Image (tube, rainbow, N blue to C red):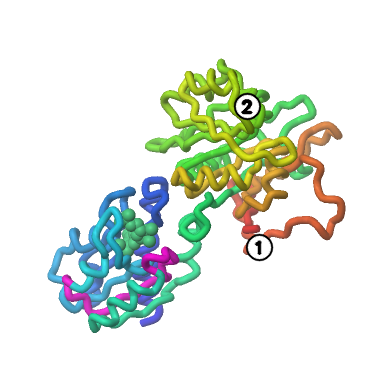
C-alpha cells in the first residue's frame, strides 16, 4: 500500500510540474483521484487565476467519485482567493480519503485545510512523498513566508574556475545541453537579474529561447543608471517588462522611463543598491523567484547580503587558464577559508559533457 500511495503521489507531482512558469506566485500542484485501484481523474493548477488542481481533477473525472481516494501534492486550500476553497469541492464530491504531499505554509491554510476535511469525516494522511513535494515548490515556500523572491545564483565556468578567457571570449563555456537547461530555468522563474557591468560588456537580451517559453521579467542592478538607451534591453523594454534598480532618480532615469523601463528607487548600501531593499520591492511586485545571472561583482554582493538561496554552477571539464580571466564570484571576497559559504543538499547532475552542481545556502 505504501508503494502504491507513493506511485500515485509521484504521478500527481509529475502533473504539478506542467504548471511550471505559468502559476507564479502560486505553487505548482497536481492531483489524482483513484477508485477501485484505477485513476478516474487527474488535474493540475494550470495557470495563475485558474482552477486549482483538485477542481481540475474533479472536472476531468470519468466516473462518480463517491468514496474515492484523492492524492494532492499540497494541502487543499480552505480560503477564498482567486478561486473558491478546494476543501468545499472535496467534501461535495464525497471523497473518502485524502492523501496530502505536504501542508500549505500559506497562513490562510497551514493545517486548517486538513482539519476541515477531518471534521467532515474524511480520512486524511499527510506527508506522502513529503520531501519531493516540498522541493518542487521551494520558490513558493520561501515567497509565501518571506514575501521576497527565492533567488538562484547561476553561472557556468571551466574546471579552473573561469567564466571567460582572458580576452573576454565566453562563447561557449558549456555545451548545448547545459545551455538548454538554463533556458528551462529562465522559463520556470518569473524574473532574471544581472548587474550593469554585464549589460555594458555583453549587451544581453535575457530572453527565454525554448519553444513555447515565456520571457522572464528583466531586472538590472544599476545604481547610477548607466544602462545605455541603445542597449538591446532598453530597446525591447516596451515588449518585455524591464526594471532598473537605482539609488536615485535623475534625468537619466527619466529618459529610461520614456523608453518603457520601470525604475525602482532603492535604499543605498555602500553607495550601491541595497539588495535586501530591492528584494522587498520585487516581492511587493509579486515576483516570487529570481535567477541571478551575474556578473561577478553582483554575485558576491548578493551572497554577502544573504539574499541568495540556491546556487547552480554549470561546470565544463576543460581548462582555459589566464591570471586575468574572470571567475564567477568577484568582489572583495571573504578573508578566511572558514568564512566560505557552504552549500547544503548538494547534487551533481551530468549534462552530456558538462556537470551541474547545485545546492542551497
Ligand atoms: C490548492 N490547490 O492547486 C493550489 C493551491 O488565489 P488562488 O485562489 O489561486 O489561491 C492561491 C493560494 O492557494 C496559494 O497561495 C496557496 O496557498 C493555495 N494554492 N491550493 O488547494 C492548488 N494552487
Ligand atoms: Zn485550492
Determine which quarter of the picture holds residue 358.
bottom right
Taking 141 as reference, is 213 above or below it? above
Query: What residue sits right under mark 1 in the picture?
Result: 344
Q: Dot 1 lies on which element?
A: strand
Determine which quarter of the picture holds residue 43.
bottom left
Q: Residue furthest top?
A: 230
Q: Residue 182: give its label.
A: none
The residue lying at 69 percent from left, 42 percent from top is 299
Magenta extent: 92-109
Q: Name the spot of residue 308 as percent of width and height, x first.
A: 63, 51
The residue lying at 37 percent from left, 72 percent from top is 100
Residue 29 appears in the figure: no
| Horizontal relation, residue 95 to residue 235: left or right | left
Kindly report which numbered mark, 1 or 2, lies closer to the viewer in this rendering.
2
Q: Name the spot of residue 97 as percent of width and height, x first.
A: 27, 79
Magenta segment's dominant SS is loop
Q: Residue 199: give its label.
A: 2
Taking 111 as reference, is 304 above or below it? above
| Horizontal relation, residue 162 to residue 267: left or right | right
Amino acid at each position: 500500500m505504501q508503494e502504491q500511495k507513493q506511485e500515485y503521489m509521484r504521478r500527481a507531482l509529475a502533473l504539478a510540474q506542467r504548471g511550471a512558469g505559468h502559476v507564479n506566485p502560486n505553487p505548482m500542484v497536481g492531483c489524482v483521484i483513484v477508485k477501485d485501484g484505477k485513476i478516474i481523474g487527474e488535474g493540475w493548477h494550470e495557470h495563475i487565476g485558474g482552477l486549482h488542481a483538485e477542481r481540475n481533477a474533479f472536472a476531468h473525472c470519468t466516473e462518480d467519485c463517491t468514496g474515492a481516494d484523492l492524492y494532492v501534492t499540497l494541502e487543499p486550500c480552505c480560503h477564498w482567493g482567486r478561486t473558491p476553497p478546494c476543501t468545499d469541492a472535496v467534501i461535495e464530491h464525497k471523497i473518502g480519503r485524502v492523501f496530502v504531499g505536504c501542508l500549505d505554509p500559506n497562513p490562510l491554510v497551514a493545517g486548517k485545510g486538513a482539519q476541515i476535511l477531518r471534521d467532515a469525516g474524511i480520512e486524511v494522511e499527510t506527508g506522502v512523498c513529503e520531501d519531493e513535494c516540498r522541493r518542487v515548490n521551494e520558490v513558493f515556500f520561501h515567497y509565501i513566508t518571506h514575501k521576497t523572491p527565492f533567488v538562484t545564483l547561476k553561472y557556468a565556468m571551466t574546471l579552473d574556475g573561469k567564466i571567460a578567457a582572458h580576452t573576454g571570449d565566453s562563447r561557449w563555456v558549456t555545451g548545448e545541453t547545459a545551455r538548454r537547461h538554463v533556458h528551462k530555468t529562465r522559463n520556470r522563474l518569473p524574473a532574471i537579474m544581472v548587474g550593469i557591468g554585464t549589460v555594458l560588456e555583453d549587451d544581453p537580451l535575457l530572453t527565454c529561447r525554448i519553444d513555447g517559453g515565456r520571457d522572464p521579467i528583466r531586472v538590472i542592478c544599476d545604481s547610477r543608471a548607466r544602462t545605455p538607451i541603445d542597449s538591446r534591453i532598453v530597446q525591447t523594454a516596451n515588449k518585455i517588462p524591464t526594471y532598473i534598480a537605482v539609488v536615485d532618480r535623475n534625468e537619466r532615469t527619466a529618459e529610461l522611463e520614456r523608453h518603457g523601463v520601470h525604475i525602482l528607487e532603492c535604499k543605498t548600501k555602500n553607495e550601491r543598491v541595497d539588495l535586501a531593499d530591492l528584494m522587498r520591492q520585487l516581492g511587493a511586485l509579486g515576483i516570487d523567484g529570481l535567477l541571478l545571472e551575474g556578473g561577478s561583482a553582483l554575485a558576491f554582493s548578493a551572497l554577502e547580503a544573504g539574499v541568495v538561496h540556491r546556487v547552480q554552477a554549470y561546470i565544463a571539464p576543460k581548462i582555459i587558464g589566464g591570471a586575468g580571466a574572470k571567475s564567477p564570484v568577484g568582489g572583495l571576497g571573504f578573508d578566511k577559508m572558514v568564512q566560505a559559504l557552504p552549500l547544503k543538499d548538494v547534487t551533481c547532475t551530468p549534462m552530456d559533457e558538462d556537470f551541474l552542481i547545485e545546492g542551497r545556502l
